[in-house]
Amino acid sequence: MKTSARIEIIIVTYNSAGIIRGCLESLYSKSTNIVFDTTVVDNDSHDGTTDIIEQYFPDVKLIKNHTNAGFGSANNLALRESTAEFVFLLNPDILLLNDAIEILTKFMDEHQEAAVCGCNLFSEVMEPQPCYGHFPSLNQIFWEQLLKNIFREHYKKHFSLITKNDSSVPLVVDYVSGSNMFIRRKILDQVGYFDEDFFLYYEETELTFRINKQGYKIFLVPKAKLIHIGGTSLNMDESKKYCIFKKSEKVFFQKAYGRRAWNIAYLFYYMNYLLKWKLTRNRKFFHFLEALKKA
């Protein structure tokens, strides 16, 4: 039985020619009991991504950016034009394994306190992948840098930024992976869209942090299952990715907790990386220091 809810799927692409067709084909083949619209926002791809969409998926609404506007900004373009009751933000490297959209829609109908929900994620060989996490905080940094290898289960349960799911029942979580976010539209209208000060990383964390502060809940729904291929659009070395990651972490801390919190976090990171570099001479800690200085 088809749901009467209005649903819009929003996918942001950037040089995604190798994966977007598979994503959209799985979307349509696994969602036969759901009526939805699909919008793709392309961030100035140069590999034929938009040609594939126009050739094989003429019913998809295609928005072409003339620059790489980043994840949050590109999603906001589509969100501003959408009037759907629910929006499902999906990465192009996602493949549906089951009728995930129907499952999430039904879950949201039955749980009015839910503002956002996400799916269980698997690799292409069906190994569990990280799908939710806890909000960054000074306590989280302390545990991650000093104690996580000693108290692994406690760290995973209370502090891990991103973790795999081993539960078969829905979980209330801090945030779900930005690769798939099923959001109640009226909540976005209340708290706002993605903060465009983030170019990449932490956008979903900051958005769900604002949603959580308003008293709404974020759920992981294990029954809804996706394959997350991962890392297909980021053509950059690890040091550059880490630098972008740290810049976004700085923005998150300043917005969520204030400048003083980031200053404390920065000092803790710096002393920890410096000590590890001095003791081990492992160049990864030197690169972490350099990235931190650029944040």
Image (cartoon, helix red, strand yellow):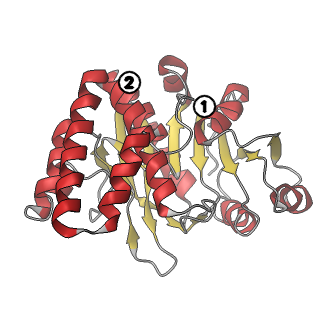
Residue 137 x/y as whole percent: 24, 37
Could you tell me if residue 178 is visible in this image? yes
Residue 1 x/y as whole percent: 62, 51
Give the spatial CA distance, label 1 vs label 2: 28 Å
Q: Residue at horizontal 36%, vertical 39%?
A: 218
For disc 2, the neighbor class at 10 Å (few under 14, some 14 to 19, many from 20) is few
Depth check, front residue: 208 or 159: 159
Q: Residue at horizontal 46%, vertical 58%?
A: 239
Q: Residue at horizontal 72%, vertical 61%?
A: 16
**Mark whose residue sits in front, 1 or 2:** 2
Residue 212 x/y as whole percent: 33, 29
User: Helix or strand or loop: what does disc 1 sit on?
Assistant: loop
Determine the image quadrant of residue 112: top left
* Circle on res. 184: none
Q: Amino acid at mark 2?
A: Lys
The residue where tag 1 is placed is: 85
The residue where tag 2 is placed is: 255
User: Helix or strand or loop: what does disc 2 sit on?
Assistant: helix
| Image height of 52 relative to 216, above or below | below
Residue 136 x/y as whole percent: 28, 40
